[in-house]
Image (cartoon, helix red, strand yellow):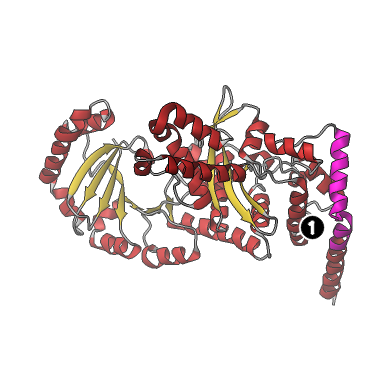
Amino acid sequence: MNGFIRIRFDEKKESYKLESAQGYYDCDYIFMIELTSPKLYKDIVADKKKINKYLLKDYNKNLVQFEDEFAEEIEINKKYFDNQFDLFSDSNYIEIDASFAEVSDYLKLNPELKMKKILFANPLDLEYTTLLEVKRYLGGVNNVYFKVDGNNEAITIEDYEKTVNKIQDILMNIKQYNYSPFERVLHAYDLVRDKQYKEEDIVEKVTVSRDLTSALLGDKIVCGGYANIFKSILNHLGLSAIVHKLNGNGETSNHAIVLAYIKDDKYDIDGVYDFDVTADSKKNDNNFFNKYAGFAKTRAQMMNIYHGKFSDDTFSLLSTDLVTCFENCYNEYGIEGILDQLLKPINKLSNLIEDKPLLDIVDLIYADQSYIDKIIDYLGRYDIILNNMLDADIFLEMLYNVRKNEYYEIPSKYPFSMNAFHEALEKSNFAFKDDAIINMFQEMFNISIVKSMEDLNNKIGSCMDKFNLEEKILGVTLAKSLKLVYEKEKNDL
């Protein structure tokens, strides 16, 4: 048996509880210890009589009464009472819920913990200020591990520092430019996808290619890795984003993309968009930078692109028309149906858009018609945000504003020509502004309506001409050429 101990001090009352870990950190059980004040670890271990008393009481009072619901907990407790494992000696991880300074002091007072993996309880952000605090108090300790959003595995101080440095380098690269929010997203997208898809080896854990840290620092990365890195960057840019999980249908594996809420006054954009970084990830040459098939599509657009390969795990039961979905569920099943089916997905969406839950359990239970109407009004606004397609004209301007900076940085890497921009518009399936009837159908069905390849080329040409792209490209390439000549002459002096 492999265990995980969780210790919390300064609780209102003392308690001990044994639960099934269900694979948490590769453990079989979690032993939770709550104490009213700090206590030496050796004294906690020595007090087995008290621990057994608490565990037996919980077993008889709570677990046995609900045998079906707590079957795994009952099995773990039975094994413990049968002396099949020891709570302390069979535990590799010990999680301590305290500050950096308090954890440091506790480890100094308990030298026997050097033989354990000490896990800091609270997940860490990826800011330099946090890194400095970690190194100040725990820099000399080599058995402390940390949680980071985007990782399933805990990481060492060394890997935490590397992760912070890598993410901050990316952020500094983006923040050096006077970008609008959506332009920052596009530049981040190009940086994250600039890594070739590669699965973990058969002997490696699946987290190697999916966890933020290992995918960022190593050479293995799949959809989960792209999604975790991209989400982390957007979050650290101040944007609301989550990993959008999709279930594979039939022979298709599960998939992970990113859903983000973006409000950009420069482009008059207020929308929620999916980003499938994997779909546009690095290939053998740099032409992959001319494809944005997975960039900034509405949820409906993205599901149409997948042609039934995936079902929506994150927002299951939510149709593309939230108001109709809510009204149908409420009329057929009442408040109980809303609580069972729509509470979680709607609140996940409202947390993304407004950083707060829209639906409250108590308010729903006592809801009158005015409360239901208020919810429907909110969902009507969400419907508009969810179906606000990014059109080709805006995308072209956004891409130009980002690509010219990328080209200035590394001209040999980032394509910057009329052909490159034409290819980007051709392969990325954005809707072009058209006559009123076509625009109406595009908005209704969240699709780009193109009659033929000739029609597409005409629309791309018109879009590029209207933006005066050729003249702008010539200006940028000329400026870059003159700068290179100047730098060469300067170096030759």
Task: Name the residue rendered at 48%, 48% in the picture.
Answer: 351
Q: Position of residue 26 (x, y in %)?
A: 37, 38
Q: Is residue 150 visible?
A: no
Q: Position of residue 437 (x, y in %)?
A: 78, 37
Give the main secondary structure, helix, strand or loop, of the magenta stretch: helix
Disc 1 residue type (three-letter) = Pro
* Residue 300 shown in magenta: no
Indicate whether 99 appears above or below 453. below
Quarter of the figure that contains the C terminus: bottom right
Q: Nearer the viewer, residue 77 or 230?
A: 230
Count of marks placed on residues: 1
Q: Which residues are magenta?
A: 453-476
* Residue 460 shown in magenta: yes
| Other-residue count near label 1 (Cα within 10 Å), few / some / many at <14 / 14–19 / ≥20 | some
**Quarter of the figure with residue 431:** top right
Q: Nearer the viewer, residue 353 or 215?
A: 353
Q: Is residue 315 visible?
A: yes
Q: In the current view of this chain or complex, which residue is farthest to the bottom?
A: 493
Indicate whether 145 appears above or below 298. below
Judging by the rendered image, the residue that carries numbered circle 1 is 411
Q: Please state if 5 lies on the left or on the right of 127 as rendered.
A: left
Disc 1 on helix, strand or loop? loop
Task: Name the residue rendered at 83%, 68% in the picture.
Answer: 483
Task: Name the residue rendered at 84%, 54% in the picture.
Answer: 467
Q: In the current view of this chain or complex, which residue is farthest to the front?
A: 369
Q: In the current view of this chain or complex, which residue is farthest to the top?
A: 250
Q: Position of residue 392 (x, y in %)?
A: 76, 46
Quarter of the figure that contains the N terminus: top left
**Quarter of the figure with residue 439:** top right
Q: Position of residue 315 (x, y in %)?
A: 51, 36
Q: Nearer the viewer, residue 21 or 313?
A: 313
Q: Please state if 189 lies on the left or on the right of 41 as rendered.
A: right
